[in-house]
Image (tube, helix red, strand yellow):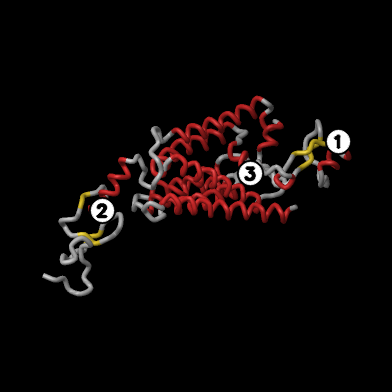
Amino acid sequence: MTPEAGVPTCYRHPDRESHIRCQRCERPICPDCMRDAAVGFHCPSCLAEGAKTTRQGRTTYGGRHSGNPATTSLALIASNVAVWLAITLTGGRASGLADLLALLVRGRCDPVGQSGTYTGAPTEQICRRGLGGDWVLGVTDGAAWQLVTSMFTHIEVWHLAANMIALWFLGPQLELAVGRLRFLALYLVSGLAGSAMILWFTGDQVQTVGASGAIFGLMGALLVLAVKVGGNVSQIGMLLLVNLFITFTIPGISWQGHLGGFVGGMLVGAGLVYSPRGPRRALWQALGIGLVALVVVAALLVRVVALS
């Protein structure tokens, strides 16, 4: 019996009418070709490809399986704790190390042995020789490293604890899905996107520290992943709402870093999970991550040039 024109047919049996689609490739499949999956059905081709991927030790989105998906998160946590300890042991908020690593848009002049900050000191030379102050470097003075080091820098222990607890819960889930290198790229590009937003929309003399931009990037990527697989987004949505409420209601929290990181994480996450399957998937993912990183770097350069 030949199916009527316009009626979908099984991709393996064109003479059989089919209204069920494979959850992976979305091709129509007949009852003989349906293979049970965690959600819906898979076709034989996708099932074979999935088995091949599993044998090669690949995650759902192409990365290599980590022996322990929490390893990268633990390394990041250890790095943040080490920096916090170094700052605490060298004076805490008054530490010169904190000034060196924190993100400051423009350099500032601090009076030696006094409180407050000198105004009207546009250069390091005027600050040191004319006013006898200490010059604190900013990004426009050449301290470009602050764009990255600030996301590993914390001064208050509660700030460190809040970010590291979030990283511990979010990081392993994402590493399990995308693999170690992709997860690390997601974390760093999200943090850099947060730094770009800070550079554009934060006051020149406001120092910013914390891993929050990168953490919000993980939330954004996890939201994209949940939408992609048709999962329950209520939990991640509730987490986002709570954090957004805290961001915009508690003074002193950098909404710029949070928003920039979140957008960056969503874009990188979309590039990872929506890249077409196949032998060139890693290339497409690399291009997606590279494109987001390129846009972020371009935004940083434009802002630095404008401020300089």
| Residue indicated by mark 1 | 132
Q: Which mark is residue 20?
A: none
Residue 41 seen in render: no
Q: For the view shown, which residue lies furthest in the left direction?
A: 1
Left or right of 94 on screen, residue 54: left
| Residue indicated by mark 3 | 147
Q: Verify CB contact (< 8 Å) between mark 2 and mark 3.
A: no
Residue toward you, 56 or 269: 56
The quadrant where residue 208 appears: top right
The kind of residue on which mark 1 rests is Gly
Q: Dot 2: what SS? A: helix
Mark in the foreground, 3 or 1? 3
Q: For the view shown, which residue lies furthest in the front direction?
A: 279
Mark in the foreground, 2 or 3? 2
Spatial distance from mark 2 to mark 1, Cα to Cα? 73 Å
Other-residue count near label 3 (Cα within 10 Å), few / some / many at <14 / 14–19 / ≥20: many
The kind of residue on which mark 2 rests is Ser
Q: Dot 3: what SS? A: helix
- Residue at 74% across / 40% down in the picture? 137
Mark in the foreground, 2 or 1? 2
- Residue at 49% across / 45% down in the picture? 186
Residue 121 seen in render: yes
The kind of residue on which mark 3 rests is Leu
Question: From the viewer's perspective, is residue 92 above or below residue 60?
Answer: above
Residue 288 in picture, x, y percent from top left: 49, 54
Residue 70 in picture, x, y percent from top left: 43, 34
Quadrant location, the N terminus? bottom left
Q: For the view shown, which residue lies furthest in the top direction?
A: 89
Q: Which mark is residue 45?
A: 2
- Residue at 30% across / 54% down in the picture? 24
Q: Earlier in the sequence, mark 2 or mark 1?
A: 2
